[in-house]
Image (cartoon, helix red, strand yellow):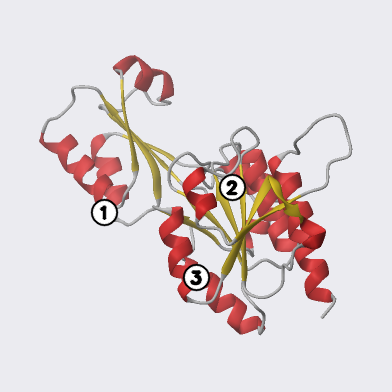
Amino acid sequence: MRYKEMAVEGRNAVLEAFRSKKTIDKLYVQDGCQDGPVRTIIREARKQDTILYFVSKERLDQMSSTGKHQGVIAFSAAYEYAEVEDMMKLAKERGEDPFLILLDGIEDPYNLGAIIRTANLAGAHGVIIPKRRAAGLTATVARTSAGAVNYTPVAKVTNLVSAMEDLKKQGLWFVCADMGGETMYRCSLRGPIGLVVGNEGEGVSRLVKEHCDFTASIPMKGNIDSLNASVAAGVLAYEIVRQRMER
């Protein structure tokens, strides 16, 4: 299957993309370009909580493939996003405790694609990513997932902490992947669970970590002290699988 992240250029085309409810991840607007049509586009973007970047004309010229961007270029997702509730429904349909993977600050599309692939194989019901400081469903992510985006829902939320609070009300509890946590083999990872994974450099952000119920670490026996984010997600995801199979 071929995936394509669409670039939409020109004021009429971009405005039509927003009004048709196409999923737009990012909008680039030329600095100082604030006439009526551009203001309308910005208003539509804010309604959909699209990430806005104000850049120079030179930057837009470099990004443009047509040379006729008219001060605006939008990028649509290569694949449609799901809703968090879709994941909960999927768990219910399967008769399983919900198992979600939440990603905090994963900006590398290859890591995101690999995690979606692992989520599918581990039986997770979905992957949740934040709108900012995170890779979206680009063509690279879709290809790296090896087709898993067709089967595993991916939701993009404005605020990860708010999403966690809503899910806690539905019975989920959250384990944070953290080097300072309890060794994962000593943790009970059963029941309705959300696995929270951060990026390799900073890990899970302080506020998100504070909203987790506890932290779990992966035993490290080598000379370096961290794993690739997608590998760490896979190791912890399969510890959850192992414990579920031991019932």
Q: Is residue 36 left or right of residue 200?
A: left
Which residue is at a point 48% across and 66% down the rendered structure image? 84
Instruction: Find the distance from the CA under tag 2 to the CA under tag 3.
Output: 34 Å
Q: Amino acid at mark 3?
A: Lys
Q: Amino acid at mark 1?
A: Arg
Q: Which residue is mark 2?
A: 3
Q: Amino acid at mark 2?
A: Tyr
Which residue is at a point 23% across and 48% down the rendered structure image? 44
Q: Which quarter shows the C terminus?
A: bottom right
Kind of element beneath mark 2: loop
Residue 77: x percent and y percent?
47, 47
Instruction: Find the distance from the CA under tag 2 to the CA under tag 1.
Output: 23 Å
Residue 10: x percent and y percent?
28, 34
Residue 5 seen in the current view: yes
Residue 157: x percent and y percent?
43, 55
Q: Residue furthest right?
A: 221
Kind of element beneath mark 1: helix
Residue 192's place in the image compared with 233, above or below, is below
Q: Is residue 69 left or right of residue 245?
A: left
Q: Which residue is mark 3?
A: 168
Residue 114 seen in the current view: no
**Label 3 neighbour load within 10 Å: few <14, some 14-19, many 20+:** some
Q: Which residue is mark 1?
A: 19
Kind of element beneath mark 3: helix
Q: Is residue 245 left or right of residue 123?
A: right
